[in-house]
Amino acid sequence: MLVLVLNGPNLSRLGTREPEVYGLTSHDDLVASCEQWGRDLDLDVEVRQTDDEAELVRWIHEAADSATPVVLNPAAFTHYSYALRDACAQLRAGLVEVHISNPAAREAFRHTSVISAVATGTIAGFGVDSYRLALSSIAAGPLSD
Ligand code: DQA
């Protein structure tokens, strides 16, 4: 099963960006880890990063049309992008919102996510391991009663 891992603005800067908040793992390292976790979980993982809201929206449309599950770190778009939220509402095969840090424990503007209400679930605060947990939840399949 293909899973798209989509990273929003500034996440290309991982490793040098505020390492006390986001750690020392680079985006290239994160890509390699996600691909390895995918192999471990029998998932075909494709990781993309963009600073461009329109490009991210187009990738979400692609996932909606192909019924592909998505792991999304919307980065700062989390807190204000209704365009991204409306795109995410069209997804049909699951959406896991991930954050490296725990936005709830940070500045007040990070306490709002406009994405969470249209996500299957949210994983935040576990460093880059948040992505492994998100991929595991997708591999485990949909929740049953
Ligand atoms: C982030 C948290 C956001 O508040 C921030 O804007 C980011 C990264 C995280 O992964 O912890 O860019 O999504």
Image (cartoon, grey):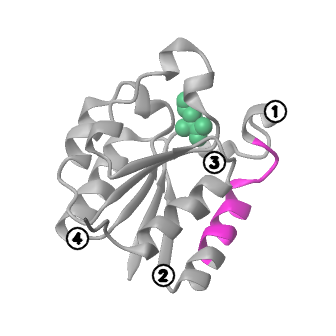
Label 2 or label 1, whichever comes before in sequence order: 1
Which of the numbered marks, if any, corresponds to residue 12? 3
Where's residue 128, x and y in %? 67, 53
**How many other residues sit within 10 Å of disc 3, few (<14), some (14-19) or many (≥20)?**
some
Q: CA distance from mark 4 to mark 3?
A: 26 Å
Instruction: Say if mark 3 contacts mark 2, CB within 8 Å.
Output: no
Front residue of this view, candidates 145 and 78: 145
Report the side of 99 relative to 28 (left or right).
left
> Which quadrant would the C terminus be assigned to in this image?
bottom left
Label 3 or label 2, whichever comes before in sequence order: 3
Say what secondary structure mark 4 lies in: loop
Q: CA distance from mark 3 to mark 1?
A: 16 Å
Say what secondary structure mark 2 lies in: loop
Q: Which portion, as a residue range, is magenta? A: 23-35
The amino acid type of the residue labelled 2 equals Leu
Eye-nearest disc, 3 or 1: 1
Which of the numbered marks, if any, corresponds to residue 43? 2
Where's residue 16, x and y in %? 79, 40
Q: CA distance from mark 2 to mark 4?
A: 15 Å
